[in-house]
Amino acid sequence: MSRTSLGIDYKLLRRIPYLILLVKYGINDRDYVAINLTRLANDVGTTPQNVFKIINRLAEDDLIIKSTINGQLAIKFSQRASEALRFVIDTIRHYLDERLVIRLVGNVVSGLGEGSFYMSLDGYVKQFIEKLGFKPYPGTLNIRLKPEYIKYRLYLDALPGIYIEGFSNGVRTYGSVKCFKASIHGLPGAILLIERTHHGLDTIEIISPYRLRYELGLKDGDEVEVLVNL
């Protein structure tokens, strides 16, 4: 397969504009999203038939996964698509010679105490060390975002992140997690987008090698800022 000097094959390079367009329509790598072929066709100046052909090509290239929701075509990104989008982000970051950051602001809230259990599981801990570069303190810091920042958290759903694979211990299956490296008031950490969670979209979970509540002197209700590195 022909590849550019950037380390990506030409065929995939030609598909990237379509992937970026789908990001605009809320397509992500976690949940299937129903798409309106007519609306998409009108927005890009082509026919629904051509859009359907493009969707099929992306599926054949293992860039999207197709399904249906209430009889309507629905798609989500494959891991290969997420890696291609990550390539785009890294390339832009290199061009700009600076980090791309999303700022999230919210208030500390108490969780259900489950974070300490999950953060101590070897199946997760080994991957955190390998992929994030640190062993997390056994617990998460829960932050309820201010309403005006929820839309930025939603952006993360559609962006490629660092994947922590799910696993099974023979008794129970544990879901996958998407992470983004982050900092909270100068301390390193990561934001977790968990496949199976009881939290709403307004609440995020942060891990760190530090016990954040103790190190930062935080209590419920305190306002905090999280800088998420893309």
Image: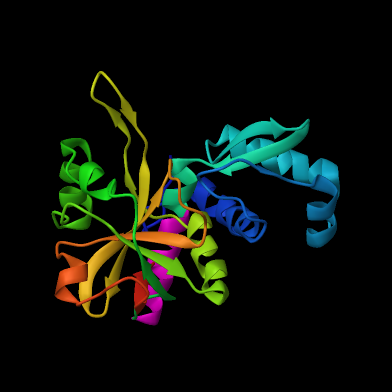
Picture quadrant where residue 180 is located: bottom left
Quadrant occupied by the N terminus: top left
Quadrant occupied by the C terminus: bottom left
Left or right of residue 33, residue 199 in this image: left
Q: Is residue 94 visible in the rendered structure shown here? A: no
Query: Residue 138 appears at what percent x and percent y?
Result: 17, 52
Dominant secondary structure (helix, strand or loop) of the stretch shown in magenta:
helix
- Residue in the image at 15% along x and 51% along y: 129
| Depth order, front residue of 197/45 | 197
- Residue in the image at 51% along x and 46% along y: 29
Q: Is residue 205 visible in the rendered structure shown here? A: yes
- Residue in the image at 37% along x and 36% along y: 175
| Depth order, front residue of 16/146 | 146
Q: Is residue 147 above or below residue 87?
A: below
Q: Is residue 103 above or below residue 42?
A: below
Query: Residue 200 appears at what percent x and percent y?
Result: 51, 54
Which segment is the magenta one? 85-97
Picture quadrant where residue 45 is located: bottom right
Whether 86 is among the magenta residues is yes
Left or right of residue 157, residue 3 in this image: left
Left or right of residue 40, residue 160 in this image: left
The colouring scheme, among rainbow, by chain, secondary structure or one colour, is: rainbow
| Depth order, front residue of 43/111 | 111
Numbered-mark total = 0
Picture quadrant where residue 117 is located: top left
Query: Residue 67 appears at what percent x and percent y?
Result: 65, 31
Query: Residue 41 appears at what percent x and percent y?
Result: 82, 53
Left or right of residue 67, residue 218 in this image: left
Q: Residue furthest top?
A: 170
- Residue in the image at 17% along x and 55% along y: 136
